[in-house]
Amino acid sequence: MSSDDFFLGYASGAAERFWHGRKRDANHHEIASALRSHGATVLTLDATRSKGHPDVLIGFRGFNILAEIKMPGANLLPQQEEWHKEWKGKVYVIRTVEEAIALLKTYEELANARDR
């Protein structure tokens, strides 16, 4: 089982992927790989049934970070805007590898300050 995918079940020993019709942005894999190469864990949230929820849950230095991955120039869909508005926590929108790494650097600073 790949850490890049979230699996819900197995059939005859082979993993079945459940995507529920969600389409990933073309830069999803590149950004998730960059996050992992900088020490983060990344759970792709394809399998949840909620409409408009973020694409990934990132674990880094003791923090859990929700993020939507979008192509540069792309806007949130209306159901995503609604979900983000209703969520009682922070949700980031990441469009580039550079934005992903900058987000981790922010949390690195928070973790360093916390751990002093």
Image (tube, grey):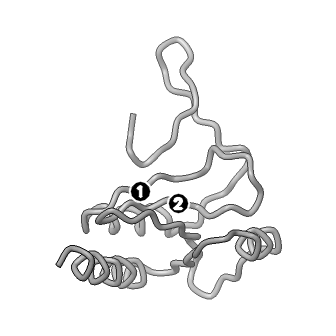
Left or right of 33 on screen, residue 46: right
**Which amino acid lies under the numbered mark 2 shown in the image of this protein?**
Val
Q: For numbered disc 2, what is the local secondary structure?
A: strand
Whether residue 102 is situated above or below residue 90 in the rendered picture: below
Q: Quadrant of residue 101?
A: bottom left
Q: Residue at x 41, y 63 (%)?
A: 32
Q: Is residue 61 left or right of residue 55?
A: left
Residue found at the far left of this picture: 116
Q: Is residue 81 left or right of residue 59?
A: right
Q: Which mark is residue 17?
A: none
Q: Is residue 92 above or below residue 2?
A: below
* Number of disc labels: 2
> Residue at 29% across / 65% down in the picture?
61
Q: Residue at x 67, y 71 (%)?
A: 88
Frontmost residue, 84 versus 68: 84
Residue position marked by numbered label 2 in the rendering: 56
Question: Pointer 1: residues within 10 angstroms few (<14), some, or many (20+)?
Answer: many
Numbered badge on residue 42: 1
